[in-house]
Image (tube, rainbow, N blue to C red):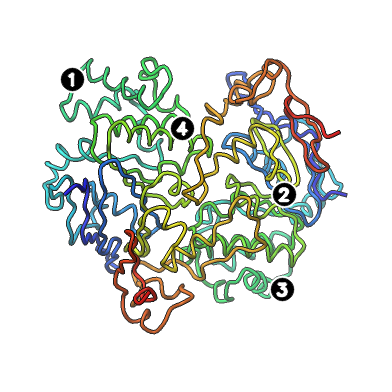
């Protein structure tokens, strides 16, 4: 059974103008235990809202999200508290996600207190969490400003680990860090994952990073998943024109690599004025008449690979 | 001298209560018309302060250019009065495109009037004709229906379009030199590509030189002709873009390039540079990179390395290259 199962999830926001923003609009995904799933897409595609739905920080307006078989958005009392301990998050900016007035020990230990772990256990567990992320135990006595960006992200990871969660949502975990530090943090996340058998949901815009760390990738565009698949197949054979465009646009650290030319034009549409038919059709270089009127369904294109595009043939 | 810009021994230091930060400490490079030089570095490496120093805007009050020379078309800029810099240089001969298009546009004026502002300020046109020129510039940066859009406010534009407006403002007075500081970092990849195409076509049209400040090794590879890598206030390596990516000579450049995840080349583990960037208030002795360098020797710990000419326009500051 999947650890996390998202079924036809929607999150619509009503605007004062009576318009509706369909931030997440019918997303179905599932993540197995121990897997890393990446969610990619441009700003405004709904990936962060989807993550907030999974963390139950935003109300669902339709569908269901199940964690370990339980309906996340209907949990109450102890069951909700258990869920909160099981699912943790690490955010992009380690400068704004750590309280500057608390010592690192208090920051990392706060989840323990919230979950009623006895006081006598605190310092040993804080110590263990700091060790796990490669920080010395003296770090507990210092304040966040005494650390560099990379070390702060280690503190945020220690805080996420301390309740021994099953799932960690990593929202752009390295994009605010210096380039020379990023590989250290990525390696740390991978080590911790295999050691603790963690499941990761990574939200990222850096596709090279995504290919490096994910088992499964979901590509989002205007509130919907347009392509989903095993990371190896999806990167070597992207089927949706949007995924193809994203991949072609990635700037490569190789001056001999030609820049993408004329692949996709324009910008992501406003979630207030959704295009008819396929939501990508106004920017799609291959759009045909059908795309303008009929929304495409998902087709299986390989055993673990789906794409929602009229031009994609189903695997026979 | 055919160089558009030559920077020689530039030092910009910050005088703080806690000590002196040598943000830029002896930087030299040259840039020809039509050329794009990428200034690559991490936060705190001095790349942004280098750009601001060229504009005569080292962050005040702590920052000051304490040594060196900046010549544009042979004219020395260091030491010019603020009045001269403002009336003849900034916005006229040198213009800047900054990272965040929202904070470099004024939310209460229409974009047309903001693009027209430098045209009026430098006396190239007045009134209605300045606005007409502004509309031409908006069209040049491919803002669709420029005439109508000139009457819109910044919040009515998307991030990519706002960055185009900022570019239009920068090129409005046909500057000789553009300084772009992380202009694509806030943009999505598909929009980044469009913006890079735009910058290249502007350069082809105007022949302006471009100093491109970035931390993104991918964008730099795609756009720049030459690259200078900064670390702790100094240029540690500079080379033609192909040479730099194919044969990086400095251990820092090598470490950066090796640590990047690369599309289509899945690795189980990334190689990483150990340690963290140095504290600018207490830089290490000798080579500033030595605490993080896998090849550091006693000499590296004691003496700063000289810049070594490796041929084909490549230079690097590293003791290991001395006899290579």
Question: Is B215 displayed left or right of B49 in the figure?
Answer: right
Circles 2 and 1: CB distance less than 8 Å? no
* Residue at mark 3: A121
Question: Is B100 displayed left or right of A270 in the figure?
Answer: left
| Image coordinates for residue A279, horizontal then vertical, percent | 65, 24
Tell which circle, 3 or 2, labels the residue nearer the N-terminal end.
3
Q: Residues within 10 Å of mark 4 (few under 14, many from 20)?
A: many
* Residue at mark 2: A232
Q: Decide if residue B168 is in sight here.
A: yes
| Image coordinates for residue B133, horizontal then vertical, percent | 26, 21
Q: What kind of element bears circle 4?
A: helix
* Residue at mark 4: B160
**Residue drawn at the location 59% of the way across and 66% of the way down:** A106
Vertical comparison of B138 with B299: above or below? above
| Image coordinates for residue B35, horizontal then vertical, percent | 31, 44
**Residue drawn at the location 71% of the way across and 54% of the way down:** A200
Q: How many angstroms separate mark 3 from mark 1 (CA)? A: 74 Å
């Amino acid at each position: 059974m999947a650890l996390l199962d998202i079924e036809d999830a929607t999150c619509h926001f009503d605007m004062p103008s009576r318009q509706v923003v369909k931030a997440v609009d019918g997303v179905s995904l599932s993540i197995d235990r121990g897997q890393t799933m990446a969610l990619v897409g441009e700003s405004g595609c709904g990936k962060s809202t989807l993550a907030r739905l999974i963390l139950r920080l935003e109300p669902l307006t339709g569908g269901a999200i199940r964690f370990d078989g339980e309906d996340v958005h209907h949990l109450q009392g102890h069951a909700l508290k258990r869920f909160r301990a099981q699912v943790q998050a690490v955010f992009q900016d380690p400068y704004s996600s750590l309280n500057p007035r608390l010592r690192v020990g208090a920051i990392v230990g706060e989840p323990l207190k919230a979950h009623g772990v006895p006081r006598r256990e605190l310092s040993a567990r804080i110590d263990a969490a700091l060790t796990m992320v490669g920080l010395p135990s003296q770090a507990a006595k210092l304040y966040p400003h005494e650390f560099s960006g990379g070390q702060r992200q280690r503190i945020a990871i220690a805080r996420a680990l301390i309740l021994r969660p099953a799932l960690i949502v990593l929202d752009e975990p390295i994009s605010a860090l210096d380039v020379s530090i990023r590989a250290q943090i990525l390696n740390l996340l991978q080590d911790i994952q295999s050691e603790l058998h963690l499941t990761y949901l990574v939200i990222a815009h850096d596709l090279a990073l995504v290919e490096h760390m994910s088992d499964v990738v979901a590509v989002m565009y205007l509130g919907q998943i347009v392509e989903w698949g095993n990371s190896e197949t999806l990167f070597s054979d992207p089927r949706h024109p949007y995924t193809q465009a994203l991949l072609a646009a990635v700037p490569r650290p190789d001056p001999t690599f030609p820049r993408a030319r004329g692949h996709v034009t324009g910008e992501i549409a406003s979630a207030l004025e959704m295009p008819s038919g396929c939501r990508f059709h106004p920017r799609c270089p291959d759009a045909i008449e059908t795309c303008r009127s009929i929304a495409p369904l998902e087709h299986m294109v390989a055993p673990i690979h789906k794409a929602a595009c009229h031009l994609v043939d189903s695997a026979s | 001298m055919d160089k558009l810009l030559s920077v020689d021994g530039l030092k910009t230091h910050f005088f703080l209560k806690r000590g002196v930060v040598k943000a830029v400490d002896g930087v030299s490079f040259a840039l020809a018309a039509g050329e794009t030089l990428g200034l690559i570095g991490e936060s705190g490496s001095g790349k942004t302060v280098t750009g601001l120093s060229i504009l005569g805007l080292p962050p005040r009050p702590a920052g000051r250019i304490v040594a060196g020379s900046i010549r544009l078309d042979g004219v020395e800029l260091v030491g010019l009065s603020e009045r001269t810099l403002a009336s003849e240089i900034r916005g006229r001969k040198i213009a800047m495109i900054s990272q965040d298009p929202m904070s470099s546009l004024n939310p209460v004026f229409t974009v047309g009037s903001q693009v027209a502002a430098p045209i009026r300020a430098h006396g190239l046109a007045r009134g209605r004709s300045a606005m007409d020129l502004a509309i031409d510039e908006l069209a040049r940066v491919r803002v669709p229906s420029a005439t109508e859009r000139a009457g819109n406010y910044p919040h009515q534009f998307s991030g990519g379009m706002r960055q185009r407006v900022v570019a239009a403002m920068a090129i409005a007075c046909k500057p000789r030199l553009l300084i772009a500081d992380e202009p694509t970092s806030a943009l999505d990849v598909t929009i980044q590509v469009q913006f890079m195409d735009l910058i290249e076509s502007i350069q082809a049209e105007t022949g302006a030189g471009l100093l491109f400040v970035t931390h993104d090794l991918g964008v730099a590879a795609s756009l720049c002709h030459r690259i200078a890598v900064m670390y702790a206030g100094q240029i540690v390596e500079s080379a033609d873009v192909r040479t730099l990516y194919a044969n990086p000579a400095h251990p820092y450049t090598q470490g950066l390039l090796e640590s990047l995840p690369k599309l289509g080349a899945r690795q189980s583990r990334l190689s990483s540079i150990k340690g963290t960037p140095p504290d600018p208030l207490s830089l290490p002795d000798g080579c500033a990179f030595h605490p993080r360098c896998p090849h550091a020797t006693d000499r590296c710990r004691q003496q700063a390395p000289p810049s070594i000419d490796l041929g084909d326009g490549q230079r690097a500051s590293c003791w290991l290259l001395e006899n290579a």
